[in-house]
Image (spheres, coloured by chain):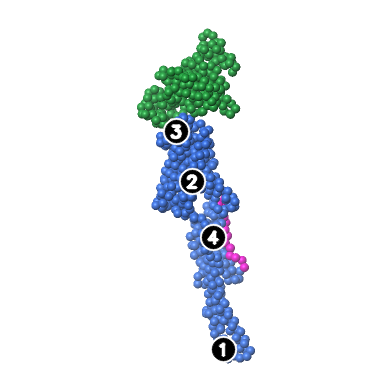
Chain colours: A green, B blue
Amino acid sequence: MAPKATTALQVDGVCKSYGERRALRGVSFEAARGELLAVVGPNGAGKTTLLGILAGIRDPDQGSVRANGGEIGWVPQQAALYRRLTVEENLRLFARLERAGDPDAAVEGMLAQTGLDERRGDQVSTLSGGNQQRINIAIGLLSEPAVLLLDEPSAGLDPGQRIRLWEFVAGLAEAGTTVIYSTHQIEEASHYGDRLLVLADGEALFDGSFAAMRRAAGARGAVKDPEADFVRFLTKQGH
Amino acid sequence: MKWLLLKDLQILKRSPLLTALLIVYPIVLAVLIGFAVSRGPDKPRIAFVNEIEAEQASEGLDLGEGGFSQEQAFDQLCERVECVDAADRDEAITMVEDGEVLGALILPEDFLDDLTDQIGGVGLDAATVEVYVNEDDPVKARLVDDRITALLTEANLRLSEEISAQLLGYLDILVEGGEFEIPLLGQTIEVLGLERTERGLEAIRGQTSGEQREVLDGVIRFAALAGQNLAFADELLGSVAEPIAVEKTVVSGDVPPLDTFAISVAIAITLMFVTTLLVAGSLALEREENTFARLTRGLVSRAGLLVEKIGLGTICSAAVALVLLGVLELFVSLDWARFPLFAAAIVLAGAAFAAMGSAIGVAAREVRASALAAFALTLPIAFLSLVPSGTVSESLFDWIRVVTGAFPFRPALDALSAGLSSSGDLGLNLFHLAILTLAYFALARVGLRRFA
């Protein structure tokens, strides 16, 4: 199937097994430009494996991943930064490794985008978890990717840091970057995701909006407890 | 790769403990080795008690012309050891027990009398000196035994030489005749001598006949034969003083000078610890900082990352080795004309240790675990590599050679020795190090598949 003009990423029948355990069972989906796609599911559903395959860190046993122009940026779950280097040194190192045309301009751009210009000279180890995650994401953006993969980006952050992080991510999507992120917090997915891809036991159970998932779960009225709605959906699907 | 290398050096600069270790460790080691090889071992301290009465002691042992002065013997002894005066036997023993001295040497009151009796042939018991030692550890015990045995052997040899010289004088008088002073009695007598006896008997031989002449001829023959045979005793007595002479010929083993070997050991140990720990830790840190997956996702290949880490280790090891050599130059004179040779040994040794460090880092996966693994692996190998041949059974030594050959320490030590002096085969050891570098690189590369 040819991708649509606005499709940034197309995934077809991706399978992955670790020995006897089947981590992914024929997962397929598409993501449009500037879309915020939340990959949700309980622990062990296959979210990190899927993002690893999309990032090219792991090879699928079957299936394919196609990016429709541009690179795929990847931000690991835990900040992948050199804690003894400063914010600026980390950004400059990865800008050089990414072979950015003008590393200094790329660094300045990311410092402005993350709002960490004043902390540029601080060692990363002295930053809060939220700010470390911002730098972590900024490094993923250095290659100016068309698709950005975020593996549980809000894990370990306090509520205030989470809000600032999601505002930052939403800004990226508004600027045209397709953002695919994994989370097991359904409230975050429902609030910040344009679409949900629900995984359970390596199987894609649902691909659509949060409202559509509620309807599929048989929930009616105003959203009171997204977590309960999600559990009801999984139960209804036999998980 | 250049940026990664600069990044690692930057991180190193910001790790004060590690940087201090990299700078201070070789300097401290160099100073210790420098003192050790330039000053030589200190004299062992021996407490000395003389119980011989002052008057008798000043007379010494009368052995004719040479004599054997106790004062002279004491001076010779104190050239070899540091003599510590002790008031009496009890104080000397206390000093040994307290560890102030390695041992105590006591000349008993009757020492000179016994020695005189023995030399004069009237005493049966050997003159005895008393030795007290504190053998609270095996190394110290061996040292004390060796020193005191050597001292007493030397004293016995000196006595033996003096006695032999005296006996040769007696024999000369017996053969040639002359004045002889009877030992101990001090009485001088005129000895006719065998030669003069023979000449006297020859002179009166013409005045005898028959049975008398036959008897006289027998006595003349005896005097002639005795004189001739006693002349041979000169050589025999000369050899008694030193019955075994040593003629040493090296048939195998191209041994470097001791100071070169000490320097090589110092550099090899420094490179082993610094480089192995640094590279193992640096690689494990990439995993702990979660940067390994990010780096190897298209920014740098796994093999490239390994090359960068081995390069880091090689650069640091070369710098550390040069610091160490620079400090050692203050103590011993190095042959800087051989710089290209020992520089090649340092670089390849550093690369081999770095490659081994990378394999350890990949296997351990965590910084602390990698440091522990590096220590646990390198220390026993270094000890095994220093086991000399002949100190263990042949088959065990063969196994030790096989095991230590799989690690860089022994070839690094041999290459450094060969580079610093003209001992050993430098080329062969450099080749050995190059092979080990490639082998450990391959091992680490395989391990990196499951590193993230």
Residue at horizontal 56 percent and vertical 12 percent from the top: A217
Q: Are marks 4 and 1 on the same chain?
A: yes
Q: Are marks 1 and 2 on the same chain?
A: yes
Whole-percent x, y for residue B71 in the image: 50, 64
Q: Is residue B318 left or right of residue B67?
A: left
Q: Which quadrant of the figure has residue B124?
A: bottom right
**Residue B133 colored magenta?**
yes
Q: Are marks 2 and 4 on the same chain?
A: yes
Q: Are marks 3 and 1 in contact (CB under 8 Å)?
A: no
Q: Residues within 10 Å of mark 1 (few under 14, many from 20)?
A: few
Q: Which residues are magenta?
A: B124-139
* Disc nearer the start of the sequence (3/4): 4
Query: Of residues B133 and A107, which is closer to you in this image?
Result: A107
| Most distant residue in the right direction | B211
Whole-percent x, y for residue B122 in the image: 60, 71
Q: Residues within 10 Å of mark 3 (few under 14, many from 20)?
A: some
Q: Could you say whether the residue bearing mark 2 is in a helix, strand or loop?
A: helix
Indicate the amino acid at tag 1.
Ile
Residue under pointer 1:
B204
Can you tell which mark lies on residue B433?
2
Residue under pointer 3:
B300
Q: Could you say whether the residue bearing mark 4 is in a helix, strand or loop?
A: helix
Q: Is residue B259 above or below residue B179?
A: above
